Every structure is written in C-alpha cells, then in structure tokens.
C-alpha cells in the first residue's frame, strides 16, 4: 500500500515540477523549451508507469501461487515470462522512438526534452529523500 502512495507522490510531484519548469521556460526561454519539457515529462511518466507495471507483474508472478494468481485475475495469464520480457523491452523501443522524434522535430528543443524526461527521476529522488527523512524522524 505504501508503494502506491509513493507512486502517487512521484507522479504528482513530476506533474508539478514539469509544469513549473515549463511555465518558467515559456517566460525566460523560447516556447520550444516549454514544449520539450512537457513532452519529455510525459514520456518520462509513461516510462515510469510502464516500468512500475512490469515490475508489479513480475513480483506478482513470482510471489503469488498459481491458483491465487488465476483467481485474482479471473483468467489464466497467457503472457507468462516471455510476454513480460517482451513488454519490458518494448519499453526501450518506445523510448528510442520518442527520443528520436524529439531530436528530429524542429519545434521541440532536444535538451529540454531530455530535462523533462529526467524530471521524473528528480521527483523519485525527492520522494525517496522525504521517505528517508520521515523514517529517520520516528
């Protein structure tokens, strides 16, 4: 349960930070920077979501007995380990395509796209730091 609340915190802080940096870049830089930050943050959040889903499926597959897994999903999972592996690495294809398009499209500044992509990582670091500080204060 705690992991879901942490994910919501990371998602919320990612959205807020990307909006803040995008608005600041619209004022101080060109609009290409703001668009790049917003699109990069969106791709970063999708990456984070896909990664979370992949790991959630792996851990559910490993730690849940077969009967519980089948009854929890209401059906037998046909993907299995190969399907999970393909989904996990298909994420890299998605990221490669997104970065390639950000590099090729003229109205997106590539460095701002990269910065926007790493806003999710910054938010994850901040959420982890806050979690460590809270546990140290107890």
Image: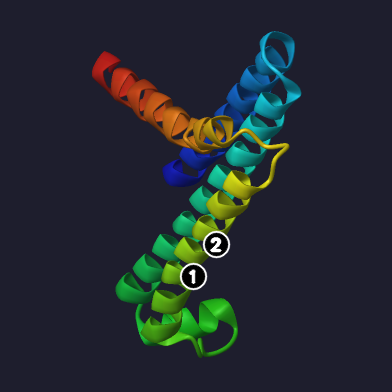
The residue labelled by disc 1 is 90
Give percent across and percent down for residue 61.
Answer: 37, 75
Give percent across and percent down for residue 8.
Answer: 56, 38
Give percent across and percent down for residue 53.
Answer: 49, 61
Q: Residues within 10 Å of mark 2 (few under 14, many from 20)?
A: some
Q: Quadrant of residue 33?
A: top right
Local SS, label 1: helix
130 to 41, vertically: above or below: above
Q: Quadrant of the C terminus?
A: top left
Name which residue lies at 28% across and 14% down: 137
Name which residue lies at 24% across and 18% down: 136
Dots 2, 1 in contact, CB < 8 A: yes
On residue 68, which mark appears? none
Identify the coloring.
Answer: rainbow
The residue labelled by disc 2 is 94
Q: Residue furthest left?
A: 136
Name which residue lies at 50% across and 45% down: 4
Local SS, label 2: helix
Q: Quadrant of residue 126?
A: top left
């Amino acid at each position: 349960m705690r992991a879901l609340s942490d994910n919501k915190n990371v998602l919320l802080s990612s959205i807020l930070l990307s909006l803040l940096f995008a608005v600041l870049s619209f004022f101080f830089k060109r609009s290409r920077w703001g668009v790049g930050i917003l699109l990069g943050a969106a791709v970063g959040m999708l990456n984070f979501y896909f990664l979370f889903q992949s790991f959630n499926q792996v851990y559910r597959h490993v730690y849940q007995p077969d009967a519980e897994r089948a009854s929890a999903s209401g059906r037998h999972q046909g993907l299995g380990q190969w399907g999970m592996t393909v989904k996990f690495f298909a994420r890299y294809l998605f990221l490669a395509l997104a970065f390639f398009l950000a590099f090729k499209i003229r109205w997106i500044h590539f460095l701002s796209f990269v910065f926007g992509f790493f806003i999710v990582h910054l938010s994850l670091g901040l959420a982890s730091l806050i979690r460590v500080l809270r546990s140290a204060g107890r």
